[in-house]
Amino acid sequence: MTEGTEEAVLAAPPVNRRLFRLATILGLLGATALAACGLFQAALALTLGAAVAIVSALWLSDLVGRFKAPEKVAPARFDWKFGLKAVLRYAFVGLALWGGLRMLPADVRWVVVGLSTVVAAVVIDGLLELLTGRRSRTGSAQ
């Protein structure tokens, strides 16, 4: 991980850390299952998709964190370095994904499944919160 990514994980709220952990576990479980079935190229494609999705979500979390104004402090400054950093990060992710799809053209569906790990983690986390909220009668969805 890069220095900025590590800072994003450490500075992320516990909910975000839980989502990223769950997305990582889902990606590893899927890749392990495919590798156990002998589909090593599919496992590599799923791992590539999951890695791109998780890193992209971490960077997006860092970007959104910059927009949240801290209390009793000057508003966040957005200069050309911030914009360039954001553009270069997503250009890198796009190039990594493009390169991966060029190397693994037959396994595009597994790359797409890997890209959906963060979405699946959000859905699972939401369902778990909904179920625990109903059990404890403190949730808003009753």
Image (cartoon, rainbow, N blue to C red):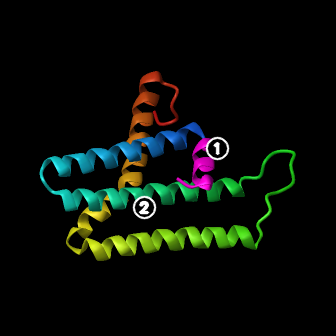
How many residues crowd mark 2 within 10 Å: few (<14), some (14–19), many (20+)? many
Relative to 53, residue 91 above or below: below
Relative to 53, residue 22 above or below: above
**Most common secondary structure along the magenta stretch:** helix
- In reply to whether residue 3 is colored magenta, the answer given is yes
- In reply to whether residue 129 is colored magenta, the answer given is no
Q: Give percent across and percent down for residue 100.
A: 34, 70
Q: Earlier in the sequence, mark 1 or mark 2?
A: 1
Residue at point 66%, 53% (across, down): 65
Residue at point 36%, 50% (across, down): 120
Q: Give percent across and percent down for residue 36.
A: 15, 46
Relative to 42, residue 28 above or below: above
What residue is shown with label 1?
A: 11
Mark 2 is on which residue type? Val
Disc 2, SS: helix
Residue at point 46%, 44% (across, down): 19
Which corner quadrant of the image does residue 62 belong to? bottom right
How many residues crowd mark 1 within 10 Å: few (<14), some (14–19), many (20+)? some
Residue at point 53%, 70% (across, down): 90
Disc 1, SS: helix
Relative to 93, residue 17 above or below: above
Question: How far apart are the alpha carbons under marks 1 and 2?
Answer: 20 Å
Q: Is residue 56 left or right of residue 26?
A: right
What residue is shown with label 2?
A: 52
Boundaries of the magenta span: 1-12
Q: Give percent across and percent down for residue 121.
A: 40, 46
Image quarter where the C terminus lies is: top left
Q: Give percent across and percent down for residue 15.
A: 53, 39
Mark 1 is on which residue type? Ala
